[in-house]
Image (cartoon, helix red, strand yellow):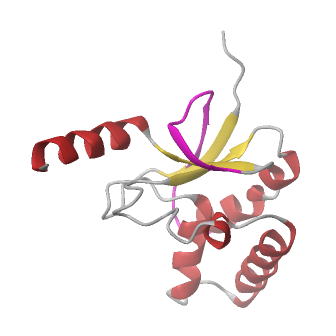
Amino acid sequence: MTDVSYVRFQGTVRNEQGAFPGVFGLANRLARAGKLSTEQYRFWRANNDWYDTNYPNPSDVDPFVYDHETNPGAVAWFKSSSLELITRVDGYLELLAAHGVECRRVDSSDPGKIIYEDEYQVVVIPYERHETSVNRRLVSG
């Protein structure tokens, strides 16, 4: 049996691109829609700022990492060794639950084709997406 190497928190409903949005995207959507209470907004802002200050943002390193045409379906996963990042997600899960937004934890030893990696996380194109993308290129090319 393989040890789990990666952890992702994601919604249970696919978005318009066909992917399951991640925990941060779900919380950001609630904040942008003005649905957070004052206390929830403070939590969201402070914790987003903490992540931004303390850990690399893959989009800052590669502006195209989440581009839908370049990397269709790209999603981020924590490395399971990034315990500080993972444990801070609990507050986001509570925030989402308060708004009836379902979010689940997914563990994988091989979540997809890695297109970005740092000490704490990877961004992957899930294999089903990568294979579909490759097949589309072959058909249309």
Q: Is any part of residue 65 visible from this angle?
A: yes
Place of residue 24 in the rendered image (x, y in percent of width and height, measured from the top left): 62, 66
Q: In this view, does 49 lie above or below 121?
A: below
**Residue furthest left as drawn:** 140
Q: Is residue 92 left or right of residue 111?
A: right
Residue at x 37% of width, y 64% of height:
68
**33 and 120: which is toward the camera:** 120
Quarter of the image where one finds residue 91: bottom right
Residue at x 78% of width, y 49% of height:
120
**Residue furthest front as drawn:** 141
Quarter of the image where one finds residue 131: top left
Residue at x 83% of width, y 39% of height:
81
* 102 drawn magenta: yes
Q: How many marks?
A: 0
**Residue furthest top as drawn:** 1
Q: Give the range drawn in magenta.
A: 98-117
Q: Is residue 38 above or below residue 3?
A: below
Q: Is residue 99 above or below residue 125?
A: below
Q: Is any part of residue 35 visible from this angle?
A: no
Q: Is residue 28 left or right of residue 74?
A: right
Place of residue 140 in the rendered image (x, y in percent of width and height, measured from the top left): 11, 50
* 47 drawn magenta: no
Q: Is residue 41 above or below residue 55?
A: below
Considering the image in quadrants, where does the N terminus appear?
top right
Place of residue 66 in the rendered image (x, y in percent of width and height, measured from the top left): 49, 64
